[in-house]
Amino acid sequence: NAGVMQNPRHLVRRRGQEARLRCSPVKGHSHVYWYRQLPEEGLKFMVYLQKENIIDESGMPKERFSAEFPKEGPSILRIQQVVRGDSAAYFCASSKDRPNTGELFFGEGSRLTVL
Amino acid sequence: AQRVTQPEKLLSVFKGAPVELKCNYSYSGSPELFWYVQYSRQRLQLLLRHISRESIKGFTADLNKGETSFHLKKPFAQEEDSAMYYCAYPNGSGNTGKLIFGQGTTLQVKP
């Protein structure tokens, strides 16, 4: 039973390019969460999605960032016109339901480097 | 603002020594709290949650509402306990997926 799969594991972009990070949740999980970890900092919540719905995007920067979780296929975190400050590890997590016990299953992360 | 604070970035102990990883929270309600762990080259995973009052891999954590703390303890550290530990709690009513994480503490257990 595969866990949360994220790709690419490493992504290098130049300033102004677009970055797309993909996340396939655990099979049977319909809730997906994206977190960002900047260097020397903890994990920061970005967005919570269910299939075809954004439930909570309170942690998303107002511009350039968007996320989706379509009916078919993986969840995508998209960063347009990347800047150096976007360099970070982006973690995806999933859960089967909205858990009362708080257990999220995390992917291994996608590390974005902006040159 | 609701926050989770882990004051130590690095905690280094010898094998067999007691371990206490500190976590303090600022929250006005009755919190649910969790400890997550990331071993080298592995994914972040749930270690334990306070509502279940369980001991996992010899670790326990007691919620102290008076001190607003949820320290993680183990009486005798093992080398395989070396990892990054994160304290976390959910933000927002009814949505425990939106976890607030502390900065993390690296535990280094020396032989």
Image (cartoon, grey):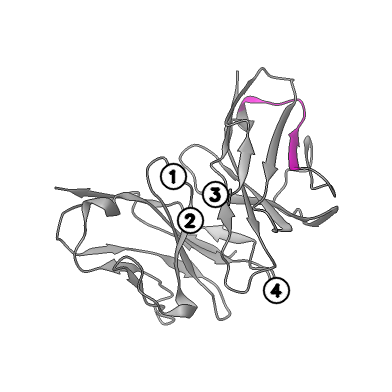
**Kind of residue indicated by mark 3:** Leu
Residue labelled with disc 4 = B94
- Give yes or no for residue A8 being in the magenta stretch: no
**Kind of residue indicated by mark 1:** Gln
Q: Badges 1 and 2: C-beta atoms under 8 Å apart?
A: yes
Tell me the tag on residue A2: none
For the residue labelled by badge 3, is the local secondary structure a helix, a strand or a loop? Answer: strand
Q: Badges 3 and 4: C-beta atoms under 8 Å apart?
A: no
Q: In this rendering, do the residues under marks 3 and 4 share a single chain?
A: no
- Give yes or no for residue A77 being in the magenta stretch: yes
Quarter of the figure with residue A65: top right
**Kind of residue indicated by mark 4:** Gly
* Label 1 chain ID: B
The answer for how far apart the CA atoms under marks 1 and 3 are is: 16 Å
Residue pictured at 37% horizontal, 77% vertical: B62
Residue labelled with disc 2 = B45
Q: Position of residue A24 (x, y in %)?
A: 68, 45
